[in-house]
Image (spheres, rainbow, N blue to C red):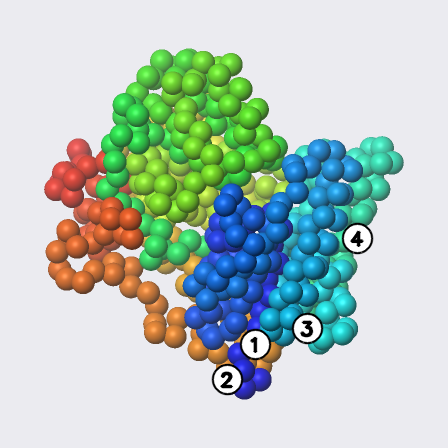
Amino acid sequence: MSRQRAPHVLIIVQNLPVPLDRRVWLECKALRAAGYEVSVICPKGPGDPAYAVLDGVHLYKYAPPKQADGVLGYAWEFVYCWLRTAALSLKVRRRARFHVMQACNPPDTYWALALPWKLLDGVKFVFDHHDLNPEVFRSRFGEPKKLAGKVQLAVLKWLERRTFRTADRVISTNTSYQDIAVNRGGVKREHTTVVRSGPDTSVMRPAYADPALRRGGKHLVAYLGIMGPQDGVDGVLLAADRIVNHHGRRDFRFVLLGFGDCLDELKQQCSDLGLDDYVEFTGRVGPDKIASYLSAASIGLSPDPRSPLNDVSTMNKTMEYMAYALPVVAYRLTETVVSGGECAVYVEPGDSDGLADAVLELADDPIERSERGYAGRRRAEQVLDWRPQAQAYIGVYDELLGFPSAGPFPDGYPSVDRRSGGSTDELRDQWGNQLVDLRDETALRAFAATRIMTPSEPVRGQS
């Protein structure tokens, strides 16, 4: 294809609006920077318009269905979203022909929309493999023993196979998912590419935070993410109960950033445990609040229990904690260890008492927090960063379409510090927060230990 006519990519997302879906938004920005035209179909978030153009990306949104309940409820949700998406794909086509449809699961139903577009309009299909739906089912309900459960699991596996077989290319979030695409999905390995959901460390970076976010406590422990049955957020509250009520540590506060099916149950559990004065639920938050809370926190928690899904899934929150130089305490899961390396403290899955004790030990050791936080930030920059992931992602499209794109960074990699001069005072993020000077190793180590301080404050125990 010629450079004069940029290929048009249509991205379909069902479970989150865009740009709230961080991975998809990074993909959109990478495609735009490389010279592609981009449209997105997704559900609306609160206050979202039906159509908007944001940073050159055309966003088509539909009203989300009511929260699903039971098998019939989920089936209706999938049908409703599929039909709304199909109708909007026609609207996108009326504006401009698209050359590729990228579907991000869950669910594994959009191969049935891609197929007619492939046959009638020559559209290529790229599957961005975010989730393992058969493993989600097994993780929530266990191995089915009754006929109804076995049928449901068989349907999920069939939908997954159809998605893999319809796809021209598969993008996997880690090597575990890539192996499933090859071994279970029958995809040629050369047609799969690993694109991790790495943090953009030029944007996700620590700042000197507002002490008020700790609500009078010395230590703030953070959880960031979805709050569903498979996410183990109840384990955070059990750990908080042990820290506050069993050990009597009234100097701790906890913040749970996010939303999900279990949010109301978690709030009730919090009240039942007598933790309302110590735990804050923020609900849905934007990048400004995430940056503030993760900069103010002392420790980030990854409490995902071991399950067929979680053990092979990459948890974005772990990498995002590391981007903010936030020491991590996590359950020892296969892909969590791949992300965290030696930068996290690991506890055996399901041991909420062990999780609490690891938090206490790390909180009371500023030198260890300094080392873990510093190493995590450097690993996020050097190993997990979005920049090499963006290059791999754009490479999929360039190869598939034969398009000589400009690449995701036509002007070179973004500067991490983005300073206009030599003064530390000039180093601020887009919300006006003073950023930690990442080029100053002493400042970064000190910040990782104490979190809230002025740039001139030393960390005890270090020169």
- Residue 3: mark in rendering: 2
Instruction: Give the alpha-carbon distance from disc 2 to disc 3, as whole Å.
Output: 19 Å
Instruction: Give the alpha-carbon distance from disc 1 to disc 3, as whole Å.
Output: 11 Å
Q: Reply above or below: 235 against 378.
A: above
Sequence-first disc among 4 and 2: 2
Q: Amino acid at mark 4?
A: Trp
Residue 394 location, x and y as percent? 51, 70
Does residue 141 appear in this view? yes
Sequence-first disc among 2 and 3: 2
- In the image: residue 153, left or right of residue 429: right
Does residue 358 appear in this view? no
Q: Secondary structure at mark 1?
A: loop
Q: Amino acid at mark 2?
A: Arg
Sequence-first disc among 4 and 3: 3
Which residue is drawn at the image coordinates 37% and 58% (left, top)? 382
Residue 452 location, x and y as percent? 23, 36
- Residue 7: mark in rendering: 1
- In the image: residue 367, left or right of residue 88: left
Which residue is drawn at the image coordinates 69% and 46% (left, top)? 133
Q: Secondary structure at mark 3?
A: loop
Foreground residue among 202 and 62:
62
Residue 101, quarter of the rendered image: bottom right
- Residues marked 4 and 3 touching at CB (< 8 Å): no
Q: Reply above or below: 25 against 243.
A: below
- In the image: residue 435, left or right of residue 234: left
What residue is shown with label 3? 123
What residue is shown with label 4? 158
- Residues marked 4 and 2 touching at CB (< 8 Å): no
Which residue is drawn at the image coordinates 18% and 63% (left, top)? 420
Sequence-first disc among 4 and 1: 1
